[in-house]
Image (cartoon, rainbow, N blue to C red):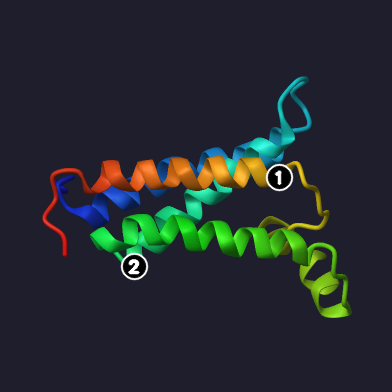
């Protein structure tokens, strides 16, 4: 049996929870009336915080990772204003649309901040009681 006291296993379990919810949300977000389309930004931020923490599980990373994820996501949002042929080619694939999206909107930014904040809280819960550097 796996010990959930191990930071990596807690992180993997968290990813197993967040990833399917995010993918299902991205698939069904238009089919449910009143379902806010931008909530996916929150799940996106949390996912990247967890994935980065899987590889850098330190106490210092608990607050650094959400800041980096937020900064990179905001940069990616602004990159949606740029449409060179290479980025259009990447965006033509499902995974490209999932990673770098296609349409710039200011409305996404509050969700990125909320998602990074929740990602930070989630990482704090993962490391609670653990012995880390």
The CA distance from mark 2 to mark 1 is 27 Å
Quarter where residue 34 is shown: top right
**Residue 45: assigned label:** none
Query: Residue 103, relative to residue 22: is it above or below?
Result: below
Out of 75 and 11, give the one closest to the viewer: 75
Q: Position of residue 129 (x, y in %)?
A: 13, 44
Q: Is residue 124 visible?
A: yes
Q: Residue at x 62, y 59 (%)?
A: 73
Left or right: 97 as drawn, with respect to 18? right
Q: Residue at x 65, y 58 (%)?
A: 74
Q: Could you tell me if the residues under marks 2 and 1 are in contact, i.e. CB atoms within 8 Å?
A: no
Q: Position of residue 107 (x, y in %)?
A: 75, 41
**Helix, strand or loop for disc 1:** helix
Q: Position of residue 79 (x, y in %)?
A: 76, 67
Identify the residue position indicated by label 1 in the image.
Answer: 108
Q: Nearer the viewer, mark 2 or mark 1?
A: 1
Q: Residue at x 70, y 38 (%)?
A: 38
Left or right: 67 as drawn, with respect to 92? left
Identify the residue position indicated by label 2 in the image.
Answer: 55
Mark 2 or mark 1: name the one nearer the start of the chain.
2
């Amino acid at each position: 049996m796996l010990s959930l006291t191990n930071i990596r296993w807690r992180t993997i379990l968290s990813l197993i929870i967040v990833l399917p919810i995010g993918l299902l949300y991205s698939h069904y977000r238009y089919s449910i009336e009143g379902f806010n389309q931008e909530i996916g930004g929150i799940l996106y931020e949390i996912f990247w915080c967890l994935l980065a923490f899987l590889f850098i599980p330190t106490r210092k990373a608990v607050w650094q990772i959400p800041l980096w994820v937020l900064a990179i996501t905001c940069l990616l949002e602004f990159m949606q204003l740029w449409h060179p042929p290479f980025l259009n080619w990447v965006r033509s694939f499902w995974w490209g649309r999932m990673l770098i999206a296609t349409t710039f909107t200011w409305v996404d930014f509050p969700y990125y901040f909320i998602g990074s904040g929740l990602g930070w809280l989630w990482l704090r819960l993962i490391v609670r009681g653990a012995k880390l550097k």
